[in-house]
Image: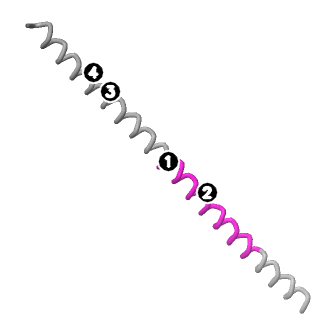
Amino acid sequence: MLLLLLLLTSGLLLLLLLLLLASRLLLLLGRLLLLLLSGLLLFSGLLLSCRLFRWLLLARHCQHSYACHSK
């Protein structure tokens, strides 16, 4: 009877340890996913701002060249 209680207690402790390890792993995976998502968002924002900057420069250049050619 005592052996059964000891095995049950150690099994519950092992299960609790596995759950704790799984939650830590899930938390780490969540943080990694969040980091990846924020990096992707930052990269797309930089890409969009570069395209916008290039478009503004091109529009300014076209406006300047149009003003030069219209004279």
Q: Is mark 3 on a helix, strand or loop?
A: helix
1 sits left or right of 22 in the view: right
Residue depicted at x 76% and y 80%: 13
Up/down of 65 relative to 50, above or below? above
| Amino acid type, mark 3 | Arg
Q: Mark 1 — residue?
A: 37
Callout 4 touching callout 1 (CB < 8 Å): no
The tag earlier along the polypeptide, 3 or 2, is 2
Question: Label 4 to label 1, Cα distance in Å?
Answer: 31 Å
Up/down of 8 relative to 34, above or below? below
Q: Residue 12: where, in percent of width, then height?
A: 76, 79
Q: Nearer the viewer, residue 11 or 66?
A: 66
Callout 4 touching callout 3 (CB < 8 Å): yes
Q: Give the range drawn in magenta.
A: 15-38
Q: Residue 27: where, in percent of width, then height?
A: 59, 63
Q: Nearer the viewer, residue 64 or 11?
A: 64
- Visual colour scheme: one colour
Question: Label 4 to label 2, Cα distance in Å?
Answer: 43 Å
Q: Which mark is residue 29?
A: 2
Q: Which mark is residue 54?
A: 3
